Image (tube, rainbow, N blue to C red):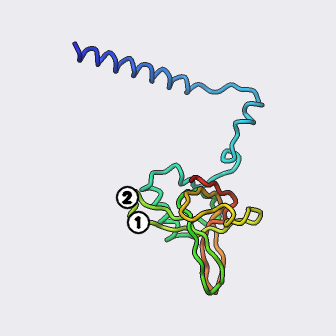
């Protein structure tokens, strides 16, 4: 008797969830005011590679590809999240900003340098090391001290933590 009751209960839950999901498949019919309010920055802006929607294993693999084959990513708009850190380099007298992305086991990490675009407040005003942040920018390169360096030229920063 308990098995039959449990089976009926599970079947009814399944029917409820199935019918709720079917309602979402229908196209939305709204007026233009509603559509304008629901448009986000990401729907307006084309993001070529969104690492924030991938599993941690896939993210780490993709970041590894970015660091080993950077020319394939130059010019692409990338969205990524990770832990913020910075480093001071004596030869240039500058601080360099990095987004650290860990693998699924959190035993390995890879850093991507990012450069903050003009017009965004100085990072010291709002970025704190070890905070979780999200970045959107265009991957590119710059020359310094006779070498080419690759980084994400960021024009949007969101502090997650």
Q: Which of the image's four quarters has the N terminus?
A: top left
Secondary-structure class at tag 1:
loop
Does residue 40 appear to the left or right of 61 in the view shown? right
Instruction: Residue 36 in the image: state x and y as whole percent.
Output: 75, 36
Q: Secondary structure at mark 2?
A: loop
- Tell me the crowding category of disc 2: few under 14, some 14 to 19, or many 20 or more residues within 10 angstroms, Cα based: few
Q: Residue furthest top?
A: 1
Residue under the image location 47 percent in, 66 percent down: 64
Rendered residue at 45%/51% (across/down): 55
Please provide percent x and percent y for residue 79: 59, 56
Residue at 37% over, 58% down: 105
Asked if 154 appears above or below 19 in the picture, the reply is below
> How far across and how far down the image is residue 129, in percent?
57, 65
Q: Would you say the residues marked 1 and 2 are in contact, meaning their CB atoms lie under 8 Å apart? A: yes
Instruction: In this rendered view, identify the residue nearer to me: 125 or 159.
Output: 125
Front residue of 86 and 41: 86
Label 1, label 2: how far apart the Cα atoms are: 8 Å
Residue at x-position 60% and y-position 81%? 89
Q: Quadrant of residue 153?
A: bottom right
Q: Which mark is residue 13?
A: none
Q: Quadrant of residue 94?
A: bottom right
Count of all numbered marks drawn on residues in the image: 2
> x and y percent of residue 144 in the render?
65, 82
Left or right: residue 123 versus residue 17 is right
What number is the disc on residue 108? 1
Q: Residues within 10 Å of mark 1 (few under 14, many from 20)?
A: few
| Residue ID for mark 2 | 105
């Amino acid at each position: 008797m308990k098995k039959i009751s449990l089976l009926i209960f599970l079947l009814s839950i399944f029917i409820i969830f199935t019918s709720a999901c079917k309602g979402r498949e229908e196209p939305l019919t709204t007026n233009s005011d509603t559509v304008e309010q629901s448009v986000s920055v990401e729907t307006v802006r084309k993001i070529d590679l969104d690492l924030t929607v991938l599993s941690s294993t896939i993210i780490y693999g993709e970041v590894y590809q970015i660091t080993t084959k950077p020319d394939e990513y130059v010019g692409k708009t990338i969205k990524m999240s990770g832990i913020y850190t910075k480093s001071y380099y004596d030869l240039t007298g500058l601080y360099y900003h990095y987004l650290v992305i860990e693998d699924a086991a959190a035993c390995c990490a890879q850093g991507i340098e990012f450069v903050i675009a003009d017009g965004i407040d100085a990072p010291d005003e709002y970025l704190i090391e070890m905070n979780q942040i999200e970045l959107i920018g265009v991957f590119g390169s710059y020359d310094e001290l006779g070498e080419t360096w690759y980084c994400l030229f960021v024009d949007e920063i969101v502090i997650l933590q």
